[in-house]
Amino acid sequence: MGRPKPRIIQQQHRDAASKLDVLIIGAGLGGLGAAISIALTGHSVHIIEAASKIGEIGAGIQVLPNSSRVLFSWGMEEALKKHATWPKQCNYIHWKGKQISHMDFHEYAEELGTPFWDFHRANLHLELLNRAKELGATLEVNSKVASIEYETAEDGRTIGVAVLEDGGKRKADLIVGADGINSRCREILLGRADPPVLTGDLAYRLLLNTEDMMKDPELRTFIENVNYVLRGGKQFNMVLLVPDDIPPGQNVAPGNVAEMQALFADWDPRIPKLLALCQSVSKWRLCIRPNLNPTWSHESGAFTILGDAAHATLPYLASGAGMSLEDGHVLGLCLGRLTGTSDAGKKQALKVYERCRRKRTERVVERGNLQQHLYHVHDGPEQEERDRLLRAFSRFNGRGKPAGKEELSEMGVRDEMDPFPWRWHGVGKWLLTYVCEGDVE
């Protein structure tokens, strides 16, 4: 029998003596998630965002069971179900079209108690924003942060001061930097420039109309059997990973459709057919952020960071957004245990927050780097060994639980050797089963 659904957290009410004023910099998924979790624990939340408006950005996003567990605990299941699609299966296919292995998402979802979900990022983002506002969080746009200062209040508490580029100031008991991979907050915390680390990859991201795909029997199978469809099945999400050729100083650039099509002309014949339906495409440079040392937080206890600002990862585990949501939830849970507003209390809360999150996010970044290599190996002995492992670990499909050490030993394999990362013997056993509340306790 699988796990039960998580308990929905009810909003706490605090008196003035134990309520923090929290300022969140960045209204992305991580910032909004932190706003929800912190507001649920009874603190006051204000979000500032550099953009002039909250608009529709991005394409598809995968939400794994560990992340949907967080969303369920925030009381968002019903609001999100209308936007979500439930993928049935994930197939691992050779670039020439032969299926090597697969994973049944329903099997894992039943065991874990929460689903694999696919969304258009804009839909998930909007519902997070709505939930944050519903809980009392406020939002201010056109507010780009230049620096962070610190003041001492009359009672001796340290107050964080976010200084905006227009000279305005926003004060709070705690400032949370959730400003993404090109984080100004990270550089402020470090006291120096710290650009994202290039990985040599870029992603072509495109959305296709499923109505066009359904006209071709070969393409129809992508929708009916294995899918990454969005918005009620109207759009098919596709991501193509290739070597990075974006000019220096840019992270996103318009793509050339014909150039992209030429790169995949001799692949599985279904791929050129899919790309023939593409009208326009964007290129996204893939970067990472190694974990900050020695800490994610300022010594005063008045400033910390989360999400991509702290530990941006490659997309090969589909876990970048999930780690940001977990960060925000854990931070809120830690702040929920405060009984006052002293610096000592804030420091302890941030210490527990980072202790819960650092090792896990480091492992996600490391495995994402490994998956980059595993997915991109050229045909030859290393590719043949990868495919052998994929087939070998397929024997555990349908069991609903991991195999024991003895059985793995008899096969001559170990835990985490499965190149299919979400299966139990990839990293599924620790990635998908994580419960924020248990870690904080």
Image: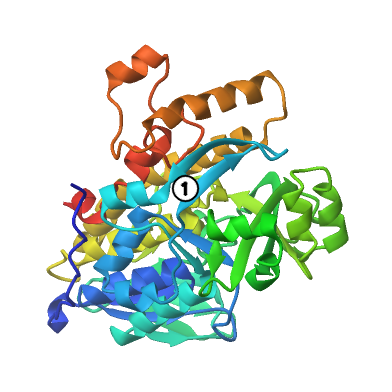
Viewer-proximal residue, 350 or 107? Answer: 107
Callout 1 amino acid: Leu
Q: How far across and down, in percent of the image, does residue 128 sit?
A: 40, 76
| Residue at 73% from the left image edge and 58% from the top image edge | 274
Badge 1 crowding class, 10 Å Cα cut-off, few under 14, some 14 to 19, many 20 or more, is some
> In the rendered view, does 282 fall on the left or right side of 347?
right
Say above or below: 165 vs 207.
below
Q: How many labels does the image show?
A: 1
Location of residue 362 (image quadrant): top left
Location of residue 77 (image quadrant): bottom left
| Residue at 70% from the left image edge and 70% from the top image edge | 212
**Does dot 1 land on a helix, a strand or a loop?**
loop
Location of residue 360 (image quadrant): top left
Viewer-proximal residue, 69 or 193? Answer: 69
Residue under label 1, please give it.
292
Viewer-proximal residue, 213 or 11? Answer: 213
| Residue at 53% from the left image edge and 49% from the top image edge | 313
Q: How far across and down, in percent of the image, does residue 152 sit?
A: 30, 73
Display coloring: rainbow
Is residue 150 in view from this perspective?
Answer: no
> In the rendered view, does 352 fall on the left or right side of 145?
left
Is residue 275 in view from this perspective?
Answer: yes
Query: Farthest residue toward the front?
Result: 217
| Residue at 57% from the left image edge and 40% from the top image edge | 92
Q: How far across and down, in percent of the image, does residue 384 sit?
A: 63, 22
